[in-house]
Structure formats: structure tokens, C-alpha cells
Amino acid sequence: MQCPHQKALARQYQPLPTLWARLEDAPGRWESFRHLQAQAGAVPVTKRSGKQRVIHFRFACHKSLRHVVDQVAFLSLLSSDWARAYYDRQRARGHSHYQALRALGAKWLKIIFVMWHRHVPYDEQYHLATMTREQLQQRQKTIA
């Protein structure tokens, strides 16, 4: 349930122009969605040495891009059911608010990267259908 203050915040601040400005108009700049996520600081750094593996916060990144991605993720909680459900699942797994927001931001960056390369607008219904299809494929793999 949204309070009037949250709705006013969502209407007042639209971070998408800032996001597009931070991404710049260079299609070849990002090699993959994973590269974009790393540059935006939306995914942690994993260091491996022998049998040890350490995962920690990514400090080396485009900080203004990370900030606007966090804002996009936060505002999507107010208008997107799948985003709210994903955030809630992350919180249920024991992630902090900011860790869950960064994970949601990483999801949005993947979606944005695909939209950018395919030159298509975002369609919530198409995204929900794609998520359902992927979940069914994963279930079939675990059954087989």
C-alpha cells in the first residue's frame, strides 16, 4: 500500500533522464549487461584465491550512475509489482535494504541493456511473460 507521500515523490522526481545521460549514447561502451552492472556498482566484487572466496561491496564504479540506478530501483517499488516482489524476496533472504535495492537495480540494468540493444520500449506485460517462461524452463530442468 502506497502512502500519498510516496506517490508525490514518484511524480516529483523522474530519474530516467539522468539515467540516460549517465549511460551516454555509446552502444559499444558496455560489452554486456554484466559489464554495465559492474560499472554501475550494482553487483559485488568476488575475489577468489585457492579455496577461499570473498564477496564485498564494489567501491570502484561510476558513482553517479550507481546513485541514479538506486533511485530507479527505489521508485520502481512504488509502481511495479514484480519489482516489489523481488525486493521482498531479497529482504526475506536476509539482505539489508540497500543490498536488496542494489540487486533490484542490477535487474533493471539488465532490462535496460536489453531494451537498448533491441531498440524497444519497456513493456511490463512482456517482462512478466518472460519471467514466467524462464521460471517454467528452470523447473523443467530441475525435474529432468
Image (cartoon, helix red, strand yellow):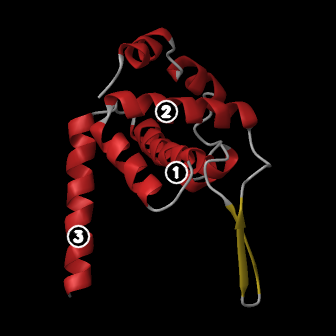
Write down the quadrant of residue 6 in the picture.
top left
Image location of residue 144, percent across then percent down: 20, 88
Residue at mark 1: 103
Image location of residue 39, percent across then percent down: 69, 46
Residue at mark 3: 137
Residue at mark 2: 74
Q: Of the residues under marks 3 and 1, which one precedes in the sequence?
A: 1
Q: How many labels, in total?
A: 3
Q: What amino acid is at disc 1? A: Ala
Image location of residue 14, percent across then percent down: 49, 16
Instruction: Please name whichever residue, 70 or 140, is drawn nearer the observer in this view of the structure.
Output: 70
Write down the quadrant of residue 46 in the picture.
bottom right
- Closer to us: mark 3 or mark 1? 1
Mark 3 secondary-structure assignment: helix
Q: Of the residues under marks 1 and 2, which one precedes in the sequence?
A: 2
Q: Of the residues under marks 3 and 2, which one precedes in the sequence?
A: 2
Q: What amino acid is at disc 3? A: Gln
Residue at (57% x, 46% y) in the render: 102
Query: Is residue 66 found left or right of 69 in the rendered image?
Result: right
Image location of residue 74, percent across then percent down: 49, 33
* Image vertical order of residue 101 relative to residue 5, above or below: below
